[in-house]
Image (cartoon, rainbow, N blue to C red):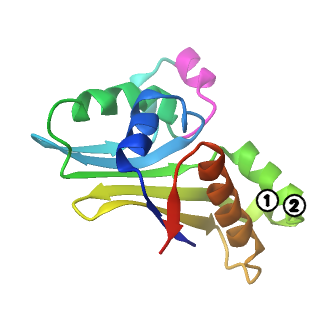
Amino acid sequence: MVALQIKEVKNFMGQLLATPLLDSFLVQEGVIHTYNSFWIDGRINADFYTKEELEEEVYDFSTWEKLRPICFELVKGKKTPTLLKLVLQQKPEDSYSLLEQGGCSGLNPALKGLLVTIKFDQNGLVLTTGTSFSTFIMDKTPDLLWDQWMKQFLTEKGIGWEEL
């Protein structure tokens, strides 16, 4: 796990809310405080869909691509939110690929997710990485691989950061 302070908040928020920067990620949960407080449970609501529509849903959670326009509508305007917090999960197939490239392919069955928490408040903007497994894992290589991937991803996207 690593905490990364984002140096250029406006740049990152613009990319997060108005570009496909993280569209491939799944949204586990979100909180946005503007004129009201909004809570997002990213889990797919099966009761909302027909059986046929539900079969088209590949994941248990909605993608950021699907929820991003709604979140953008909630935060756009002259005032910034007092809080924006998102817990995003890399898609399983991307996580498995990352672990396999790093020599950790045997951990795939235990992997629940590679996560990043994005938190914006009066103190700034911090991204915190995390891993979730269904059982205790002694090997910290997946954590290191995920931390390194996130740092490289941000750098490649021109997003300045410093480790806290």
- Asked if the stretch drawn in magenta spans residue 80, the answer is no
Mark 2–mark 1 CB contact (< 8 Å)? yes
Which residue appears at 51% of the width and 67% of the height? 162
Which residue appears at 77% of the width and 80% of the height? 139
* Residue sitting nearer the eye, 98 or 58: 98
What crowding class fits label 2: few (fewer than 14 Cα within 10 Å), some (14-19), or many (20 or more)?
some
Horizontal arrangement in the rendering, residue 2 relative to residue 77 (left or right): right
Quarter the N terminus occupies: bottom right
* Residue sitting nearer the eye, 85 or 81: 81
- Disc 1 residue type? Asn
> Where does the image place residue 28, in percent across and percent down from the top left?
46, 48
- Asked if the stretch drawn in magenta spans residue 59, the answer is yes
Identify the residue under disc 1.
108
Which residue appears at 49% of the width and 28% of the height? 19
Q: For the residue labelled by badge 1, is the local secondary structure a helix, a strand or a loop?
A: helix
Magenta residues, start to end: 51-60
What crowding class fits label 1: few (fewer than 14 Cα within 10 Å), some (14-19), or many (20 or more)?
some
Identify the residue under disc 2.
105
- Disc 2 residue type? Ser
Which residue appears at 20% of the width and 43% of the height? 80
